[in-house]
Amino acid sequence: MGHRKHSQPRRGSLAYSPRGRAKSMEARIRGWAEVDSDEPRLLAHAGFKAGCIQVVSIDDHEHTPNHGKQLVTLGTVIATPPFVVIGIRGYTKDANGRHASFDVYAKDTPKNVEKAFKVKVNDSNMEEAEKVLGKIKDIFAIVAVTPKLVGLEQKKPYIFEIAVKGGDVKKQFEFVKDLLGKEVKIDQVFESGSIVDAAAITKGKGWQGVIYRWGAKRKQHKSRKTVRELGSLGPISPQNVMYTVPRAGQTGFHQRVEYDKRIMIVSNTEKNEFQINPDGGYKHFGNVNGDFIVVKGSVPGTYRRLIKLRHQIRNEPKKITKPNILEVVLP
């Protein structure tokens, strides 16, 4: 008998491989957009996923059938506590990529940051950094986000880098220098109508079969002993299984970035602009207190997970249009 062709996965299902567990609960951002401006600015913020709501707005996308009409869309509520700028990092560049040249840290930082991130603060570090600015290609702000500020149990902060773009390197350095030891709120980085990329670790599914994991087609009834397995893993000779053949394994808890998420609302629970908390709070999260945003659509990850929001790296519009929000429908 000839070899039967194994069930092929659906088109587009082989986008990511290998699908292993993420190394950390915190997603890494490896690319940053270029900003056409003389004024330096931070390109990211972070928050924690709280829950989902429905947003009733006026569709402002031109040349669409629903333009000017009411539109009900899913919205994801993200609690965005202010982060603290605890340091500056300068990078040089060569053929082998970026290389950290200097680190300068703030003198006064919160106690929980000091416990998680012990550094020696030296006044001479600032002077030495300013001397080598001519060789520096990129400036990053080192920031700390504390989950405890949004009512979560975790006291240990997430510490990561945020790119600073706009102007020259000297302007960028002075910009972050002025922010050392200070808090930065979400409305200082993004505004309503901004488009962002959401980076997070997806919800873990554990060990799953090839049908669920790769979207392979189920076999025909009575064609083989099994239905939810592949028909063949490959030829008899050479006797090996190629890496392109879908197999069962870990599903979920992967690092992913979703592009072009529109921020519908940037607000604070004290403003009473929108009633954002349902009765009894959000499931698995509780009530949102302080600063928050509502992003159109879904974002990766489960509730309470860290979501990094980066300035969009694709398809940047010429101007930011503020959404016309009519109503927020709570779950």
Image: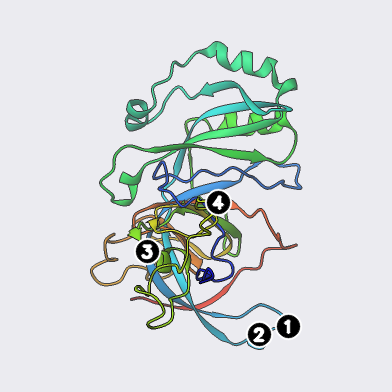
Residue at (37%, 63%) from the top-left corner? 209
Q: Which residue is mark 2?
A: 67
Rendering colour mode? rainbow
State the residue lying farthest toward the front: 1
Q: Earlier in the sequence, mark 3 or mark 2?
A: 2
Q: Which label is found at residue 63?
A: 1
Q: CA distance from mark 3 to mark 2?
A: 43 Å
Q: Amino acid at mark 2?
A: His
Q: CA distance from mark 4 to mark 1?
A: 55 Å
| 303 vs 317, nearest the viewer | 303
| 247 vs 12, nearest the viewer | 247
Q: Amino acid at mark 3?
A: Gly
Q: Can residue 205 be seen?
A: no
Q: Amino acid at mark 1?
A: His
Q: Which residue is mark 4?
A: 238
Task: Residue 235: give x, y in percent of width and height.
Answer: 53, 59
Q: Are marks 3 and 2 in contact (CB under 8 Å)?
A: no
User: Which dot, 3 or 2, sits closer to the camera?
Assistant: 3
| 277 w.r.t. 161: above or below | below
| 303 w.r.t. 93: above or below | below
Q: Secondary structure at mark 2?
A: loop
Q: CA distance from mark 3 to mark 1?
A: 43 Å
User: Which dot, 4 or 1, sits closer to the camera?
Assistant: 4
259 horizontally vs 301: left or right: right
Q: Earlier in the sequence, mark 3 or mark 1?
A: 1
State the residue lying farthest toward the left: 280
Q: Which residue is mark 3?
A: 209
